[in-house]
Amino acid sequence: MEKQLSDIEKIRQQFDAAPYPRIPLDQYPNDMKYLTLHSITMAYYLRDQEVVDTEGKVILDAGCGSGFKSLALAVANPGAKIVGIDLSEESTKLAQQRLQHHGFENVEFHALSIYDLTKLGMEFDYIHCDETLYLLPDITAGLQSMKAVLKPKGMIRANLHSAIQRYNYFRAQKFFKLMGFMDDTPGQLEIDQVKETMKALRNDINLKTTTWRPELEDKEEWYLANYLLQGDRGYTIPEMFAAIRGAGLEFVSMVNWHKWELLDLFQDPDNLPASLGMTLPELSEEERLHLFELLQPAYRLLDFWCGHPNVAAPIVPTREWTDQDWQTVIVHLPPSLSVSQVKEEMLTCITEIRLPEISKYLPFIKESPLLMDSTVAALILPLFDGPQSMPSLVQRWLQVRPIDPVTLEPVSEAQAFEAIKPMLITLEQFKMLLLERRSRKD
């Protein structure tokens, strides 16, 4: 126990001395993809096939650091209360200043360990634990602590460093520990010593070829976050799932789920070797993700959503919805698209009859660039004023395409309904639209 407390104290001292991230106080998060990753909308939608209203939600930023991600949570979730905690008191002071500087008042920050969350006397709709969980001596206990303050339908976003992808940095950390650079809180002296050591190595030395990035050699926080990070640990997919289960939680999805598709690693997914073709369909989600990381350990973070078990009803794929289901559908724009910047681009493209590039606003797509037909853009234009029902979009289509371009006959409501249904299904697959059945919500 003394060792664990010592590890935590080292982490606290490191981030008191060098709060992270070092982003200027006046910098505002306005990248649509970044904000989408900090919106609770997609997490709830993936689990429940419902679009939540962020007004009045209570969000915890567990390990808030200097508060830039707390600011992103506030911007991406209008009307939500933001609560931040961090071991480092200096970090929480900066976070408070940052949110106040940008005019957010429904916020509070506390110098507190994740293990002590119940001391807040609060429950949360969403817990954002980014770049923090892997620093805890016991990740299962950390998840259990978050579960204890999570509302029954709440969700947790957390991540772990990949033991496989980050292996070479762990080697580097062991090396610099043996050199004595991490005995106390690393500072400028230790950063300079690391820089001198790495630059002195021959260019063909494995540790240098796999970890050294000359373009970042003048960024002090890069050394502290990689070569000199106290308490840094790596995990595998099975260890991640074991911690989730051990905490009494249920895995929902990887945050970047579209990047973890096992079949995408094969040249011809429809023509696999017989052994693979028979085995892969029988694998659990955990097994498929584990195989992916063994074949392609490309991602530094094992970034995931989880929540209380048995909360969500089974998801019915949109292609299996009945016509009766479709009559109740409400269509929403995702947070990254429902902004004036995207609307102005849509209007310009519709007017000039050219294809708007949507992929630059969406973090959850494989194809890039991804273009949208200007006629489809005209169909969904009313969504910028708010969610639309399926019948209202049918009427919109009758205005946009009143005449069948082949027969030159007037388009009926039934034809319009059948025309836009596959469009919405495709757009939903790319998460360019979110489709919610009122029958499910009622």
Image: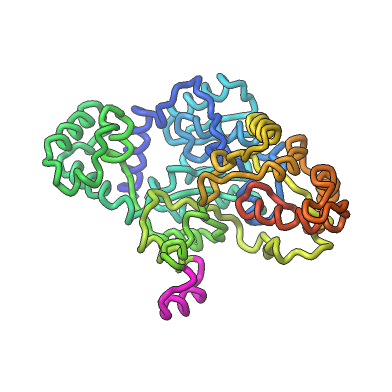
Provide residue 212's location: percent of width, then percent of height: 24, 40
In this view, the residue in front, 131 or 415, is 415
Considering the image in quadrants, where does the C terminus appear? Answer: bottom right
Q: Residue at x 86, y 46 (%)?
A: 395
Q: How many marks?
A: 0
Is-magenta flag for residue 274? yes
Is-magenta flag for residue 5? no
| Above or below 254: residue 16 | above
Indicate the quadrant where residue 175 lies: top left
For residue 192, side relative to residue 290 (left or right): left
Q: Is residue 102 among the parts visible in the rendering?
A: yes
In this view, the residue in front, 379 or 3, is 379
Q: Residue at x 61, y 57 (%)?
A: 308
For residue 115, side relative to residue 203 (left or right): right
Q: Residue at x 63, y 38 (%)?
A: 354
Indicate the quadrant where residue 35 lies: top right
Provide residue 409's location: percent of width, then percent of height: 86, 53
What segment carries the magenta color? 269-285
In this view, the residue in front, 386 or 92, is 386
Provide residue 96's location: percent of width, then percent of height: 53, 25
For residue 21, side relative to residue 149 (left or right): left
